[in-house]
Amino acid sequence: MTAPVECRGVCVDRGGVQVLTDVDLVVEPGDWVAVVGPNGAGKTSLLHAVAGLIPATGSLSVCGLDPGRTSRRRIARVLALMPQRPVVPEGITVRELVALGRTPHLRRFGTETASDRDAVERTLDRLDLLGLAERPAAGLSGGELQRVVLGRALAQQPQVLLLDEPTSALDIGHQQSVLDLVHRMRLQDELTVVAAMHDLTLAGQYGRRVVLLHQGRVVADASPTEVLQPARLAEVYGARVEVLERDGGPAVLPVRADR
C-alpha cells in the first residue's frame, strides 16, 4: 500500500539558501504527524514542498502522485492545506468560502452539482457552522474563521490534510476546539494529518508522531515521549524546559533561569 506522504532526500532552496536538507519522512494512513522546530527550521517549507507549492529536489509522493509534476487540480483532490494566514476574499460568505473547497471536483466550466452542494452542507453541519453560513467570513472571530477555513479544506474531501500552525493566533479554548475537530475528522474520515505546530505541548497531546526539524534537517522522528526530551529541546531550542508525562501525552513547561 502506498504511503499517503513519502519524502526521500528532499531538499528545498529558497533565494539561494537551502532551507531543507535530505529530509526523509514516511507518513502512514490515518496518522497524525506533528512537525516541530524553532522558527526558521523549515516546517512551513516542508508542508509547501509536500503540497507542490515550491520546488524541491529528491523524491516526493502524495497518494502516489508527484506534487511537483502533477496538476494543482489533481493534487487538490487528494490533499488540502490549511494555511497559517488564510486569505479571505472581501464580501465572501461562510458558505461560499467553504464551497471553494469543492473547486477541484467541479465539472467543466465550474458547474456545481447536487453532490457538491450536499458536501458543503454536510461540512457546515459537522463543524457547527450552519448558523454562520450567510455571514461575511471577514467579520468572524479568529476561532470561527479557523473553523471555516478548516471547513473549506474538509470540503475538498482530501486523503491528506496539511496544517500550517493552525492555532498560532488562537486562545487556548479555540486551540483545543480546532484540534479536537481535526482529531475527530481524522478518525471519522481516515484522514492523514501532517501539522506544523509551534506549541510543543499541543504537538505532544495530538500528534501520534513528532518530527523535530533543526536547521532544515530531521534530528528526531519518534513518539512524542521519545522526541520531547528536556536535553534535546535545550540543544535545539536553547530553552530550559521541564517535561511532564500526562495521560494524553507529554506537557512541555518553560523553567525560569532562577528556579
Image (cartoon, helix red, strand yellow):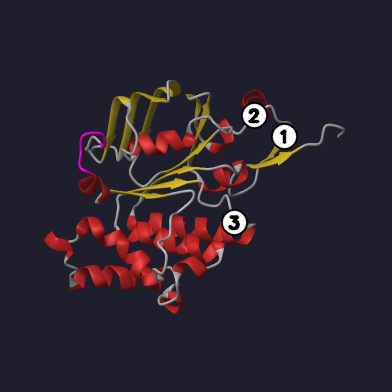
- Residue at 32% of width from left, 30% of height from top? 55
Q: Quadrant of residue 122?
A: bottom left
Up the image or down, 45 lies above or below 169; here it is: above
Q: Earlier in the sequence, mark 3 or mark 2?
A: 3
- Residue at 20% of width from left, 42% of height from top? 71
Q: Nearer the viewer, mark 3 or mark 2?
A: 3
According to the picture, the residue beneath numbered tag 2 turns out to be 237
Q: Tell me the amino acid under the disc marked 1.
A: Val
Q: CA distance from mark 1 to mark 2?
A: 10 Å
Q: CA distance from mark 1 to mark 3?
A: 23 Å
Q: Position of residue 131 (x, y in %)?
A: 45, 79
Q: CA distance from mark 3 to mark 2?
A: 23 Å
Q: Nearer the viewer, residue 152 or 61?
A: 152
Other residues around mark 3 within 10 Å, as few (<14) / some (14–19) / many (≥20): some
Q: Quadrant of residue 186?
A: bottom left
According to the picture, the residue beneath numbered tag 3 turns out to be 170
Residue 69 highlighted magenta (yes or no)? yes
Q: Which residues are magenta?
A: 67-71
Q: Tell me the amino acid under the disc marked 2.
A: Tyr
Pointer 3 with pointer 2, Cβ within 8 A:
no
Q: Is residue 107 visible?
A: no
What secondary structure is the stretch in magenta mostly built from? loop
Q: Quadrant of residue 62?
A: top left
According to the picture, the residue beneath numbered tag 1 turns out to be 241
